Image: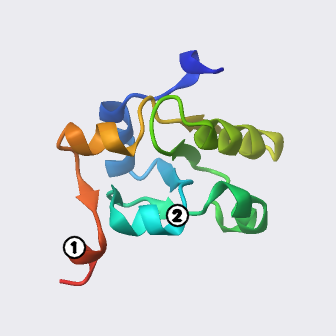
Amino acid sequence: KDSLDAIPAEKLLQMAKEDLITVLDVRPKEEFEAGHVQGAINIPVEELEQHLAEFNPEHEIVAYCRGPHCILAFDAVAQLREKGFQARRLEDGFPEWRIAGLPVEDNSSNTH
């Protein structure tokens, strides 16, 4: 759908460190709690509309879900762009992120 506009994981990490983006996990809450990209916020795609005011309009939003073919991130990006936000999707999804050994948070790391 918009594969040319996807952002690779390394670029996402760099932009997140520089506080230039909002990382958005659009998977269901249970999946987010089981593990997510470090620093990501969780708003399931079906709840996105109610949370638009929470986003910094100066930040680009990078959405991700279950993988490169998961439709949730595509839907989130389309909704956000429709509302005037700069939005892209992560090239891969959370499973690929975790396999690559990139920074992850889960319930056990949040409670210590």
The disc at residue 16 is: none
Residue at (73, 46) in percent of width and height:
80
Query: In the rendering, at what x and y percent does residue 102 appear?
Result: 22, 45
The disc at residue 109 is: 1
Query: In the rendering, at what x and y percent does residue 67 appear?
Result: 45, 36
Query: Residue type at mark 1?
Result: Ser
Question: On the image, which quarter does residue 70 sit in?
Answer: top right
Question: On the image, which quarter does residue 108 sit in?
Answer: bottom left
Tell me the SS state at disc 2. strand
Query: In the rendering, at what x and y percent does residue 92 appear?
Result: 41, 32
Residue 56 visible = no
Marks 1 and 2, the one that precedes in the sequence: 2
- In the displayed structure, 90 sits above or below 36; it is above
Query: In the rendering, at what x and y percent does residue 68 appear?
Result: 47, 30
| Foreground residue among 9 and 59 | 9
The disc at residue 42 is: 2
* Left or right placement of residue 12 versus residue 84 in this view: left
